[in-house]
């Protein structure tokens, strides 16, 4: 492959480096595996660069390769345990729990106080508890502002599937956030007591 | 919800909460939801809270940068891949143009 092609690939990839790493770390759960994933995906993308149509959405094209690469690696490894039962989470879970325990539910950014208490690492811990198909779609949504249509292209699945996974994943994430907050003593009471 | 007369409207708006926050509704549906939120304080609280949760998750998840040396390693890897490819291409050319 000509050096100019490598330069052309790099010019498109470099602005995505932080995004790619951010998504990879949410997929894999740790920095080391995330670095490996980004490197592997980048090499695969570079080798497949012939198939990229200039002028189309490079970001969606690259993240499709990154996501497929992640799934491929995952198939070779054991499944990560899901420690929280997130099925059947009711609507407005955090809203209801916040109201019950005295966290703000009104104002310009009512959940800000809860998120300040949680901090980045606990939010990450909560998203890692989601079952894989919900974690992947939620990560692409939260990290990259991809539209439903773009996520459907990245994951190669129908928009309706993206929508339903995203909506359900959000509900699960709210419950996971609350459980993480309780486990770290940020909120009084137990999950069972308030459900 | 604001009152019993508005109940169906509240339910209808609530069913569209996620799509509304993600700007996935048609302009007409968006207008109807916005109209409802202007007159329903309870739904406004719920919608604002959900928007705030989404913003909070987004803020926290994005607070991370790639390791400074990752890009350098990737660049080196790409150069290596390009060199290997060029070398293979040269070999192929030499083979193609060699004595038959």
Image: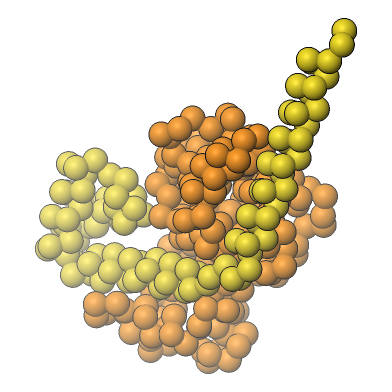
Residue found at the far right of this picture: B100
Residue A139 at least partly seen: no
Residue B70: x %, y % from top left: 63, 64
Residue drawn at point x = 51 percent, y = 55 percent: A14
Colour assigned to chain A in the rendering is orange
Say left or right for B69 vs A169: right
Residue drawn at point x = 29 percent, y = 77 percent: A109
On screen, residue B87 above or below A69 = above
Q: Quadrant of residue B43?
A: bottom left
Residue found at the far front of this picture: B99
Which chain does yellow denote in the image? B
Say left or right for B54 vs B68: left
Give the camera-side residue of A32 and A14. Answer: A14
Residue drawn at point x = 50 percent, y = 82 percent: A119
Say left or right for B54 vs A106: right
Residue A40: x %, y % from top left: 71, 50
């Amino acid at each position: 492959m000509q050096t100019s092609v490598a330069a052309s690939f790099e010019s498109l990839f470099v602005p995505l480096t932080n995004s790619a790493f951010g998504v990879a770390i949410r997929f894999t759960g740790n920095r080391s595996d995330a670095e490996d994933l980004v490197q592997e995906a980048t090499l695969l993308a570079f080798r497949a660069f012939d198939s990229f149509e200039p002028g189309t959405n490079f970001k969606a094209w690259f993240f499709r390769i990154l996501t497929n690469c992640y799934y491929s690696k995952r198939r070779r490894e054991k499944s990560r345990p899901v420690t929280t039962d997130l099925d059947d989470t009711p609507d407005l879970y955090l809203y209801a729990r916040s109201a019950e325990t005295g966290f703000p539910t009104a104002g310009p950014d009512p959940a800000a106080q809860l998120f300040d208490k949680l901090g980045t690492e606990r939010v990450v811990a909560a998203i890692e508890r989601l079952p894989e198909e919900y974690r992947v779609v939620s990560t692409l949504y939260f990290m990259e502002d991809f539209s439903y249509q773009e996520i459907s292209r990245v994951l190669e699945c129908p928009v309706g599937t993206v929508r339903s996974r995203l909506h359900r994943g959000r509900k699960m994430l709210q419950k996971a956030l609350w459980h993480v907050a309780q486990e770290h003593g940020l909120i009084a009471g137990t999950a069972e007591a308030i459900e | 919800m604001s009152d019993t007369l508005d109940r169906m409207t509240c339910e209808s708006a609530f069913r569209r909460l996620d799509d509304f926050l993600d700007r996935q509704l048609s302009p007409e549906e968006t207008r109807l939801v916005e109209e409802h939120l202007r007159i329903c304080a309870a739904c406004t609280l719920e919608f604002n809270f959900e928007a705030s949760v989404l913003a909070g998750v987004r803020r926290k998840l994005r607070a991370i940068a790639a390791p400074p040396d990752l890009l350098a390693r990737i660049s080196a890897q790409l150069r290596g891949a390009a060199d290997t490819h060029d070398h293979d291409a040269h070999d192929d050319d030499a083979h193609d143009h060699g004595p038959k």
